[in-house]
Amino acid sequence: VPIRGNVQTRLRKLEEEGMDATLLAYAGLLRLEMADVATEVLDPSVSLPAIGQGILAVETKDEDEATNRRVSALDDAGARAAALMERAFLRKLQGGCQVPIAGHATVDGDRIQMRGLVAALDGSLVYEDEAAGPVGDAVALGTALADRLLAAGANRILDALKAEAGGPQA
């Protein structure tokens, strides 16, 4: 059942329409101090999240040295590397908010790994693969992972979706 709106609206619709369950981003529930409504947290091995799910970012101007110094303490090098790998993967696939692409990167020491996926909207076709290597190669690894999925046939799904929408997805 299509369900849209903010978390509170989605939970209200869940009750009003007699649905058994819905999927919500746990990071969002945590941020809203509503983690208690979750009955299960899905591990990425069960259901890959959207690219960048749960990663928070602060954007600054390169030339604003004072602000950059202040926010540097907030930087998490592992989260940054994961975001770079995931975003490189998404950029290569030319994905947007309507394209069924998922991925999750994790860092362990100086190694990064990512599982990525492209699926048909109805789930009839799923292309999935993994990549791993040095953290410093995060962008190249994300791009290479996308290239492998495209070569395996994921481009057919993406091309069909673009053709339906009349061009690249936004």
Image (tube, rainbow, N blue to C red):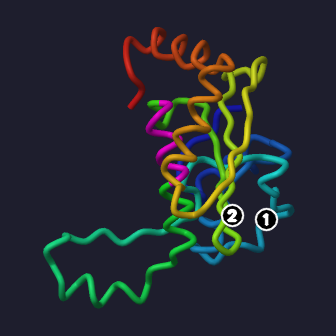
Image position of 19 with respect to 155: above or below: below
Q: Residue at x 47, y 45 (%)?
A: 88
Element carrying mark 1 = loop
Identity of the amino acid at label 2? Tyr
Give the residue number, with chain letter if any, for mark 1.
38
Give the residue number, with chain letter if any, for mark 2.
26
Identity of the amino acid at label 1? Ala
Quarter that holds the C terminus: top left
**In the rendered picture of this protein, how many numbered marks are placed on residues?**
2
12 or 30, nearer to the observer: 30
Element carrying mark 2 = helix
Contact flag, marks 1 and 2 (Cβ < 8 Å) = yes
Residue 124 point in image, percent of width and height: 78, 17
In the image as oriented, which residue stretches furthest toward the left?
Answer: 63
Q: Is residue 30 left or right of residue 65?
A: right
| The image quarter in which residue 69 lies | bottom left
Q: Which mark is residue 131?
A: none
42 or 102, nearer to the observer: 102
Magenta stretch bounds: 85-93
Q: Residue at x 72, y 43 (%)?
A: 130
For the residue carrying disc 2, how many other residues have a C-alpha within 10 Å: few (<14), some (14-19), or many (20+)?
some
Q: Residue at x 52, y 40 (%)?
A: 143
Residue 136 point in image, percent of width and height: 51, 62
Residue 88 colored in magenta in the image: yes
